[in-house]
C-alpha cells in the first residue's frame, strides 16, 4: 500500500526544531484572547469597563488580549472569566500515537 503523505507532520517538525511548545502556547493564547474579546463584544463591554470589572488596569487587560503575549497568569484568566460571568475549563488530552 502506498503512503498518501511523505515525511513527518507539522507537530513532528516543530518538535524536531524545538518550536512545538512555543507554537502551542501562542495558539492557546490566541484562542483565549479571541474568546474573551468575543464575550466582551457580546456583553457590549468596553476595555475600560472590563478592566474595572476585573479590578485591574487597561494595560493589564491589553496584555491579556495580546495574542502574542503568552505570559498569562491563571489569576488574570480567572479574573476575566469572573468579570464575564464565566468559568474556566482546562483539559489535558493524550497525544496521538506515532
Image (cartoon, rainbow, N blue to C red):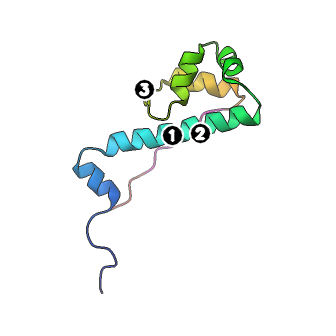
Q: Residue 71: which numbered mark, if any? A: 3
Q: For residue 91: magenta?
A: yes
Secondary structure beneath dot 2 equals helix
Q: Is residue 85 left or right of residue 90?
A: right
The answer to the question of whether label 2 and label 1 lie on touching residues, with beta carbons closer than 8 A, is yes
Q: Quadrant of residue 27?
A: top left
Q: Quadrant of the N terminus?
A: bottom left
Q: CA distance from mark 3 to mark 1?
A: 12 Å
Secondary structure beneath dot 3 equals loop
> Residue visible at 66% across and 23% down?
47
Q: Residue 30: which numbered mark, if any? A: 1
Q: Which residues are magenta?
A: 87-93
Q: For residue 63: magenta?
A: no
Front position in the image: 87 or 6: 6
Q: Mark 3 vs mark 1: which is more N-terminal?
A: 1
**Few, some or many residues within 10 Å of mark 3 (<14, 14–19, 20+):** few
Which residue is disc 2 drawn over?
34
Residue 94: x and y in percent read 41, 52
Q: CA distance from mark 3 to mark 2?
A: 16 Å
Q: CA distance from mark 2 to mark 1?
A: 6 Å
Amino acid at each position: 500500500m502506498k503512503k498518501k503523505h511523505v515525511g513527518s507532520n507539522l507537530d513532528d517538525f516543530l518538535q524536531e526544531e524545538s518550536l512545538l511548545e512555543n507554537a502551542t502556547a501562542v495558539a492557546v493564547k490566541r484562542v483565549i484572547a479571541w474568546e474573551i474579546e468575543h464575550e466582551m463584544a457580546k456583553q457590549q463591554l468596553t476595555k475600560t469597563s472590563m478592566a474595572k470589572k476585573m479590578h485591574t488596569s487597561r494595560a493589564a487587560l491589553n496584555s491579556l488580549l495580546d495574542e502574542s503575549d503568552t505570559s498569562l497568569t491563571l489569576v488574570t484568566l480567572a479574573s476575566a472569566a469572573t468579570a464575564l460571568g464565566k468559568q474556566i475549563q482546562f483539559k489535558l488530552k493524550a497525544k496521538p500515537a506515532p
